[in-house]
Image (tube, rainbow, N blue to C red):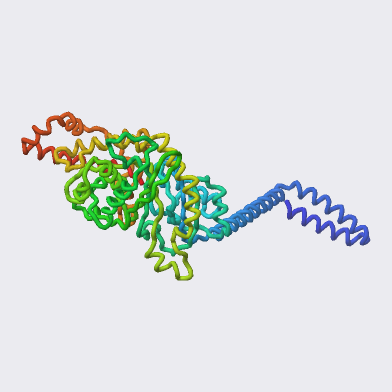
Amino acid sequence: MLKHWIHLLRGYSKHLIKFQTPKMSESVVTDVKKVVTQELASSPEVTGQKRKLENEDVASSSKKEKIDHDAEDNKDSATLKRKKVALLISYSGKGYFGLQMQKTQVPTIEGVIVKALHDVGVISQEDADTPQKVRFQRAARTDKGVSAAGNIVSLKMSVHLENFLEEISQVLPQHIKVQACIRTTKGFDCKNYCDGRTYSYLTPTFAFAPHKLAVTERYRVPGDTIERVRELIKRFEGTHNFHNFTSGLKPNEAKAKRYIISFKCGEPFVRDDIEFVQLTVRGQSFMLHQIRKMIGITMAIVRGHCGEEVIDKTYSLIKVDVPKAPGSGLLLEELHYQNYNKRYGNDGVHQSLDAAIYREAIDQFKEEYIYPEMIRSEKEERSMMTWLNTLENHDYDEIPAEKLLNWKYNENKEEGKNENSTNSPEPSELKDIKDSSSENGNKDQVDSNNTEKVPEESTTDKDMAQSSDNVKDMAQSSENVKDTVQSSDNVKDTDKGNKMEVS
């Protein structure tokens, strides 16, 4: 159709030009062009070509938009060029289910921090959803309700923000603060590079009063009692076998040996009409419950429940009944990186990982957000006063093999009762003890604040509980005793997977 009209136009134009004047020819040609144009506009062939061109224009526009979008993404990727950093953090653990993010949707310290990092634009949404992609790591894990003055997390993030600390403080709650952002080496891992940890324990001084003395919150400790405490905790310094101060370890396991660098007791002070004292311990690493049990046995000795010789007995290969102090006063004070600082701290490129540089800000945070919560908790919940009443239930002596099962069950039951009245952990907080052992770099178990969940009473547990009154009769039969010991070992092994970590 198109070719036909073009051919007709050309022939007709030549014919007119031949017989008409130039002016007439021009006028006729113009009229013919109008007619042809109208006919062509309604032609299916022309309409199809027009639509094809319009579609090509749309496709070209979409392609251009896609190119612009890709360019914007590339620009964002360039902005998020990551560097390895260490974040020094302080936080009050009240109201959180520990530091580490969990599969269940419960509030955690890490969850809040990771969201804040995304909100200020130093990690992407994909990084926030999968922190492993940016090598996110924590130096020491703390559990439900536990606070830290100087914990550290390491990750790869963008460092394009000049005022990063100011911006992230605006999106974080007041009780969580990033004290410093420190550039590190590419291979830095805050857990594995840590060569020392310092914890403190805040307790009312009436915890050291003689157990026969009826005390109240207005009790004031004598100076000689504080000196007695200092003498006792000094005995924990050095390398010892602390298998009696944790759970799930056999006496002859190598990792039961730990090195305590220092153990000190400060001067008493009064807050809200209660006198407190703070004990501070520094070691290379700590096992599950270790710090709380060292403090628990110290309180038992000072109060007169047992003699000082029980400390030496705990270092032997026998199993000794050691009480565990409440976790509400435990605080992660500081992490130490002496070897890292010695090698990289003065190389002109990297900064030292030294919390002392930020001591003033950290102390201010403790005074505003950590200590007030600890003191309020003791004043309202009376966790220490309640726990002191349980010390008389311990015998502080070797536990016979045939009694180990019932002893373990009763210890868990007693601990469960204490913690139920003071923010007991939820079932979702249960962690395998092997996971706990990996938190201290050398596959150590972090000393923690929460407690073990009372295990459900199995058939073996019920049988043992029912036969507890007949232990003497069982001891008379060597075969029965052997079977009982074997059953105890089996249940003990089963319980290993049902521990809850506390820090």
Q: Position of residue 467 (x, y in %)?
A: 15, 30
Horizontal arrangement in the rendering, residue 125 relative to residue 263 (left or right)? right
Residue shown at the point (50%, 60%) measured from the top left? 82
Q: Residue at x 44, y 64 (%)?
A: 185
Asked if residue 114 can be seen in this view, the reply is no
Can you name the residue that lies furthest to the bottom here? 347
Along the horizontal axis of the image, is 293 left or right of 481? right
Relative height, residue 203 to residue 84 (above, below): above
Answer yes or no: is residue 358 visible: yes
Q: How many marks?
A: 0
- The answer to whether residue 387 is above or below residue 436 is above
Q: Does residue 410 appear left or right of residue 153 in this picture?
A: left
Residue 445: x, y in percent? 31, 50
Measuring from the top left, give residue 49's x and y in whole percent: 69, 51
The one nearer the camera, 297 or 210, is: 210
Q: Position of residue 428 (x, y in %)?
A: 37, 39
